[in-house]
Amino acid sequence: MTDTDILILGAGAAGLMAARTLAKAGKKVIVIEARDRIGGRIHTVKHGPSQQTMELGAEFIHGDLPVTQCLLEEAGIAYPHASANMYKYENGEFTTDGPLVEHWDELIEKLNALEQDITIDQFLQREFNADKYEGTRKMVRQYVSGYDNGDPAKASSFSLRKEWQAEDMGAQYRIAGGYVSLVDYLADEIKQAGGQICLNENAKQIEWQQGRVMITTKEGNAYKAKQVLIALPLGVLQAGIDQSASLSFKPTIPVYSDAIAAMGFGAVIKVLLEFDEAFWESKETEDMGYLFSEQEIPTWWTQSPQQSNVLTGWLGGPPAEAKTDMANDELLTQSVQSLANIFKYNATELRKKLLSWKIVNWTADEFTLGSYAYDTIAASEARKIICQPLQDTIFFAGEYLYEGTAMGTVEAALTTGLRMAEQILRFE
């Protein structure tokens, strides 16, 4: 039986940020992680013949985000610009002109006039139902699915309105050496302050009373503490008891469980393909950074401004959820065919140019069960419930509890981890 002041479940960005803050404040902290690595949805690898750094999970810093950037500067980790040109491929042509979504200004104007929250699907059906808006409806739904990983039939119009008007697509960065540099820095800080990180420990049950918790793991170990901070992905917290990563409470916490169930958690499949040449570079697309299409795997990006033979594919939302159980070989075939269609290649010949590949189906990952959160209509009220500590004993942190405009990001996770750690310290 291991005893400590505070247990933290999950060694992703939120859990590590919280553990670092608490450990440096003098608390005895143990982080319990089910995987054999830290980082959670951050997973940087060196892959293929080039051994180039590739991000299987989080990849970009989307905007000037204070917590992430301050932490990187503190650690002395560079984060060069990764802004690049956006292309659309439609009707057999590449274009860079015009907005990504038709009638964008009208869309924002009508969203701003919305007085009561409804789903984005309901909003489109009510305000953009005419035939001339067919392209707008399609692109908005694709954008919500792709960028937000959300289900348009559940996603909040109010939340999307706030997000879309705050975006700065010109401020995009990648981290030198990958996001793993950041999580390694946090882990080192935790250990230097006396904290522990225990890997391969899948927490299954929390027995609790005010001021005392005991956690038992699938591996048969037990940990005791005065408080627990749960920094697990929302998908794991929503998991049914038959799923390997599910967590139970004794006694149950129905108000919190209902709030967790009311929130939206997206689906995503990420595809990394390394070719023998950057075949996509032509007079039409020589400065391409991001490419949006209507193919089976619709979204692609390069490593621009870095020269690279790697293309990254992205499928999010309900289309990704529908492929949760699809074999990676079949996903690879669909990915290559999508590129062949776009760049007018024979798929068999294009496949021969492939040097290495990696597909990450985060929705099928047993310790994630999805991608990142998006707001449903009920999410705002649910978040208020989950952010309140349960008898100063059970706390929650994670990107799904973030209330700013950088939802679904590492910034969101770091911010909530820091905030909840400070809240624990204030309870003394």
Image: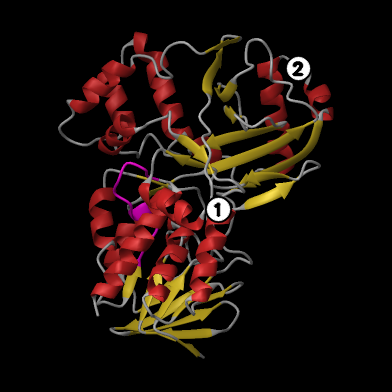
Residue found at x 65% / y 44%: 54
The image shows residue 114 at horizontal and vertical percentages of 18, 29
Residue in view at x 56 percent, y 35 percent: 315
Circle 2 packing at 10 Å, graded few (<14), some (14-19), many (20+), is: some
Q: Which residues are magenta?
A: 396-407
Which percent across, then down, holds residue 129? 31, 17
Residue drawn at point x = 60 percent, y = 79 percent: 219
Vertical placement of residue 178 versus 109, above or below? below
> For the residue labelled by badge 2, is the local secondary structure a helix, a strand or a loop?
loop
Vertical side of 157 occupied by 100: above or below:
above
Type of amino acid at the residue the image marks with label 1 = Ile
Q: Is residue 367 magenta?
A: no
How many labels sit on residues?
2
Q: Nearer the viewer, mark 1 or mark 2?
A: 1
Q: Is residue 209 visible?
A: yes
Q: Amino acid at mark 2?
A: Tyr
* Of 387 and 186, the residue lying toward us: 186
Prevailing secondary structure class for the magenta stretch in the rendered image: loop
> Pointer 1: what residue?
42
Q: Is residue 11 visible?
A: no
| Residue tagged 2 | 345
